Amino acid sequence: MTDSSKTPIDFWFDFSSPYGYLMAEKIDDLAAKYGRKVKWHPILLGVIFQTLGTRPPLDGTSSKSTYMWRDFARSARFMGIAYNPPSRFPLASQNAARAFYWLHGQDCALARQFARAVYRAFFVDDRDISSPETVLDIGAGLGVDREALAAALQNPDIKARLKDEVDAAIKVGVFGSPHVIIDGEAFFGADRLPQMERWLETGGF
Amino acid sequence: MTDSSKTPIDFWFDFSSPYGYLMAEKIDDLAAKYGRKVKWHPILLGVIFQTLGTRPPLDGTSSKSTYMWRDFARSARFMGIAYNPPSRFPLASQNAARAFYWLHGQDCALARQFARAVYRAFFVDDRDISSPETVLDIGAGLGVDREALAAALQNPDIKARLKDEVDAAIKVGVFGSPHVIIDGEAFFGADRLPQMERWLETGGF
């Protein structure tokens, strides 16, 4: 038997995903409560949708989209999380994701802090996180060297790392965001937090 | 101000929807706890998907489908509800829905009992609820006259009633099952039960 208390929880998300933001605000505390670590994996859902031949859940004016915008805000209130609907949506998230992986190579706690700051910039402060400038500003706000980060956004190794993570996500069955895997068991959506907690508590149910 | 304690909760569902089944097992008790009634509306999701130009969430072998089958079973366990994966899926649900509306014209408590029995026949006992015979058997098990029910399945007024309900569902924004509306606020999915409860408790949050 492997010691699952040592196995990190995998958290796959896109920086443009509102439910991903809600999960990001909760998952580390939940994991810590059960002595577990979380491995954060920003990915590009657009690439995944294209590869799988699926459509994004939000498509503008449909009744489902109207519902989802209302549900994002209500779910945030339900979970006690700050949220303001962004004026631009969706936003390309590859700059933020590349910055994350570069930072992760230096300091994984800082990378996580950066990820949470990106999400709040998008879903609380309505900032354009697709722009390299915004990504650099967020990094600088956390003490990251601006020029080094700017170079990292164009670094072929970092670009390849992000591509590898997207490929790995598809391989483990990721089809949306947030997608969490605990000891092989997949949980899709911020609304699966109660089931995740029971799973961690009981070792499966 | 209208007295919302008198306004029924609208519960839209397809008899072929596993999450609809989970909601059906819980919604009346939740509503009763807050002094509210529930109006059950079986509908045909296939017609809604076709009208809206959307695709059903389950499409056989995708990673999302694989996840959802696992999630149905896990969500049922999480909610303490009996569930066995059906060997045939999806099943046409118009016979069950027509039987419901005919019964509802005679005895709405009986119609609801019938609805729960249809769901359990499908998602616990793996019966083919698309077949008129199964629908008649389920009715007969509840004391319903078999010949009268068989006639109702072909009754043009009952067929029209089901069509009207599907049209009404689209008009109020239904795009999947289960879809619940409490005082104008929509909740999609069995996993929204905790938010529904807070809504009923607080009158909106």
Image (cartoon, coloured by chain):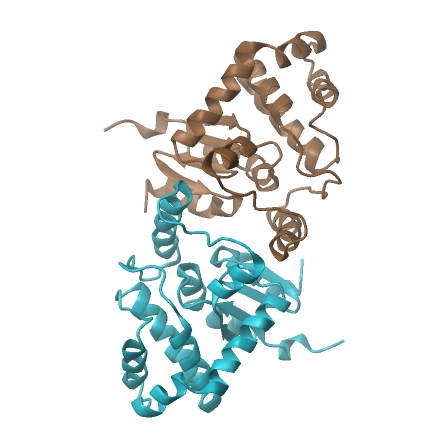
Chain colours: A cyan, B brown
**A160 displayed left or right of A100:** right
Question: Where is A64 relative to B153, above or below?
Answer: below
Name which residue lies at 48% across and 26% down: B166
Question: Where is B71 relative to B140, above or below?
Answer: below
Name which residue lies at 43% across and 59% down: A19
**B108 displayed left or right of A116:** right
Question: Where is B23 relative to A167, above or below?
Answer: above
Question: Where is B195 relative to A121, above or below?
Answer: above
Quadrant housing residue B204: top left
Residue B179 appearing in the image? yes
* Foreground of the two, B9 or B69: B69
On the image, the x and y values in percent for residue A202 come to 64, 63
* Foreground of the two, A115 or B163: B163
Residue B36 appearing in the image? no
**B182 displayed left or right of B47:** left
Name which residue lies at 47% across and 71% down: A29
Name which residue lies at 40% across and 70% down: A93
Quadrant housing residue B1: top left
Q: In the rendered image, which quarter contains the N terminus of chain A?
A: bottom right
